[in-house]
Image (cartoon, helix red, strand yellow):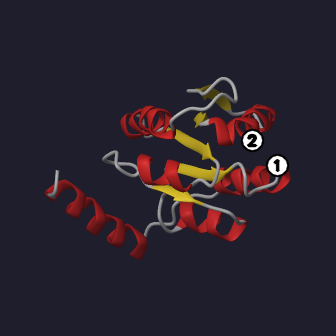
Amino acid sequence: MKIVVGSDHGGFDLKEDLKAFLTELGHEVEDYGVYDAQSSDYPDVAFRVAEDVAKAPEKKGILICGTGIGMSIAANKVKGVRASLCHDTFSARCAREDNDANILTLGGRVLGKGLAREIARIWLEASFTGGRHARRLGKIEKYENSKR
């Protein structure tokens, strides 16, 4: 799977760890920055990753900031993105199975590397189940398309 990743300074260390882990799992990983731990603005990276994922349904994205909250808010401003902040494995599975999330957001300052790896692995392995969930996502898409 093609995965685009990005972080701000608060998520840089976790992003670097996850890049190696995802590559070990056999995924193709593209890094959209940042490339060091110097202070940076999360919206810049969030918009870049989100726009790419919105245009390319075969891609998934992972965004990391200090808490994951800022990245989630920014990414969800991009039409067609369903970014989900997950701090546990149950939410990660549900984000894909029920909400068809195409971007996972994580908190580099609130998650350990081991748990973050497990969340990412489960999120990537899960698939959208459709059914009643598709109807609900259709309502979100209809609303999104009517307001922009």
Query: Along the horizontal axis of the image, is 85 left or right of 17?
Result: left
Please count the marks in the image. Answer: 2
For the residues labelled 1 and 2, say whether their Cβ atoms are less than 8 Å apart: yes
Q: Residues within 10 Å of mark 2 (few under 14, many from 20)?
A: many
x, y percentage for residue 78? 34, 45
The extreme front residue here reads 39
Residue under circle 1? 113
Q: Residue at x 44, y 31 (%)?
A: 48
Query: Along the horizontal axis of the image, is 82 left or right of 104?
Result: left
Query: Along the horizontal axis of the image, is 100 left or right of 85?
Result: left
x, y percentage for residue 143? 21, 63
Please give the label number shown on residue 14.
Answer: 2
| Between discs 1 and 2, the one toward the N terminus | 2
Q: Secondary structure at mark 2?
A: helix
Residue type at mark 1 is: Lys
Q: Is residue 108 above or below residue 96?
A: above
Query: Along the horizontal axis of the image, is 63 left or right of 142?
Result: right
Please give the label number shown on residue 105.
Answer: none
Q: Is residue 117 above or below residue 132?
A: above
Residue type at mark 2 is: Leu
Residue 1 visible in rendering: no
